[in-house]
Image: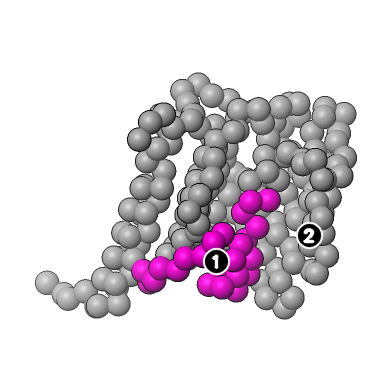
Amino acid sequence: MPRIPRFVCARRRAGFLLGVLLLAGCAALRVEPGASPARDSLTAFSLEGRFSLRQEDRNYSGRLSWRHQGENNALMLSSPFGQGIAEITTTERGAQLITSDGKKYSAVDAETLTTQVLGYPLPLALLTEWVRGRGTRSAASEVDAQGRLRHLRHDDWRIDYDYASDKAQAPPSALFARRSDGLELRLRIDEWTALASADAGP
């Protein structure tokens, strides 16, 4: 029987660790039976999508799996071919990132963490609202005839939206976020799922 090279085993162990972390981060979440992916139902959500990010002369692209509930998030970043790049989890205690080779990093929030480790900031706190097509009190926004966000300005960011459905409560299918310093993030959402709240208690 041929021997498996050590680096292959190491990558498999790293992938296993990422999977365990993802399951642990999402253990308190459950899919709400029969829930439709309407914006009002996306207090807690999961999504599958594709992203591209440009910062100065650097470009990144890949796939994103994201589960969100309150201050808890679990994001899996993968290459366009599905190979794991990093797993990011956040709670009220801070953020943690595990790379594909099993290295762990921690910081106070996801934006600080991703800047330190991946080389680009992932504005997770803002993205949580933007991705659902929600504005904020400090944001200037434009809506379409159905009341859905089309354009949003938040501090030095501008976000443009697209929708795959004509329904008034349809969540966004894509967004394009640009910051005044040239950072650009494109996110196309392939699948939305509304999640129920976690059980109360310890």
Task: Mark 2: give few (<14), some (14-19) or many (20+) Cα within 10 Å.
Answer: some
Q: Can residue 81 be seen from the camera position used here?
A: no
Q: Is residue 123 magenta?
A: yes
Q: Is residue 99 above or below residue 45?
A: below
Number of marks: 2
Residue position marked by numbered label 2 in the rendering: 178
Task: Mark 1: give few (<14), some (14-19) or many (20+) Cα within 10 Å.
Answer: many
Residue at the image point whose x is 85% and y is 36% from the top: 143
Q: Position of residue 197 (x, y in %)?
A: 48, 30
Task: Identify the image quadrant of the N terminus.
Answer: bottom left
* Image mark for residue 18: none
Colour option used: one colour
Residue at the image point whose x is 47% and y is 65% from the top: 106
The residue sitting at the left extreme is: 1
Q: Position of residue 87 (x, y in %)?
A: 45, 59
Report the span colored magenta: 101-126
Q: Secondary structure at mark 1?
A: helix
Q: Can residue 153 be seen from the camera position used here?
A: yes
Residue at the image point whose x is 62% and y is 54% from the top: 124
Residue position marked by numbered label 1 in the rendering: 113
Q: Nearer the viewer, residue 64 or 95?
A: 95
Q: Is residue 57 above or below residue 139?
A: below
Q: Position of residue 145 (x, y in %)?
A: 87, 29
Amino acid type, residue under disc 1 in the picture: Leu
Circle nearer the viewer, 2 or 1: 1
Taking the image as shown, residue 58 lies to the left or right of residue 6, namely: right
Q: Is residue 12 magenta?
A: no
Taking the image as shown, residue 13 lies to the left or right of residue 98, namely: left
Q: Is residue 34 above or below residue 189?
A: above
Q: Position of residue 84 (x, y in %)?
A: 44, 62
Q: Nearer the viewer, residue 198 or 173?
A: 198
Q: Earlier in the sequence, mark 2 or mark 1?
A: 1
